Image: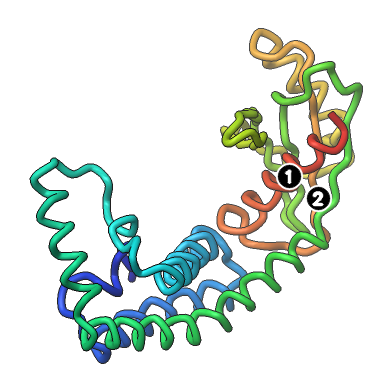
Amino acid sequence: MVSLSANWFIEGSIDFEHKKYLLLSYLKQINQSFHSTELYPDLTDLIFHYNNLVKFKKDKTVIQKAFPQRLTKADMEKMALTYEKMVQDDALMQEIEQIITYALSKMDPALQEGKEIYEFVQSRINIETIGVVPLFPYRGYMLLRNGDDKATHVYEYQVTIFESNLEKHSGITTTFVNHYVRSLIYTPEAIRKDLIHSRSSIMPNPAVYHIESDISFPLEKTFLPLAKRSLVRYLAGVA
């Protein structure tokens, strides 16, 4: 798997041709994933690198923030001298800026393709509440129906709400529970009853959501991640 470090564009030899080779190898893998409708973790990684380059280009004087923070005082002092030298070296900065400009121009089309796929998949997802919703809907089960997949995949989920900089954020974790072969017997309602019966000691009155797509997508790399995000937004709207 080809990957880029957070500081790939300013690490090691600052050579345009070498960095170009690294970038194109990375983007080749990203594009292959997108062409297979596989979004994660590649889309998240691409967004991180794109924003990192934009941030660096916007304010080169905070170059140190692009580096790992767990450093000793001595290391920090040495790096401070390196940063200062790098910023003051016009030829070096020109090379870095050339690398960044080229990288952004190549990342942007891939990023747009990833966003278009994301929006398309999102448009095919529908969420339905199964049974009575408990007062605390932030823990329960997701029943995933992925297009013409012959199974309904069941995940236990838990949503965590935390505050940062006076804003609320939500995160979701999931654990695979079981899968049920789709049939007239195992309807979403029947699966809910079976889960309550077989796992009553874990969750006697769970929230259950049926999340369905009419088109099949890669489960682990596309459908499950977007189903999780969709559920978080759905709960934020109904809670």
Badge 1 density bin: few <14, some 14–19, many ≥20, Cα 10 Å = many
In this view of the protein, which residue sits in the foreground, 183 or 191? 191
* Above or below, 15 relative to 204: below
Left or right: 66, with 31 as reference point: left
Q: Position of residue 63 (x, y in %)?
A: 31, 63
Q: Residue at x 79, y 24 (%)?
A: 207
Q: Position of residue 127 (x, y in %)?
A: 84, 44
Picture quarter with the N terminus: bottom left
- Residue topped by disc 1: 144
Q: Quadrant of residue 131?
A: top right
Q: Which mark is residue 212?
A: 2
Task: Give the mark nearer the N terminus: 2 vs 1.
Answer: 1
**Amino acid type, mark 2:** Glu
Left or right: 141, with 93 as reference point: right
* Above or below, 238 relative to 9: above
Q: Position of residue 84 (x, y in %)?
A: 19, 66
Picture quarter with the C terminus: top right
Q: Residue at x 27, y 89 (%)?
A: 16
Marks 2,1: beta carbons within 8 A: yes
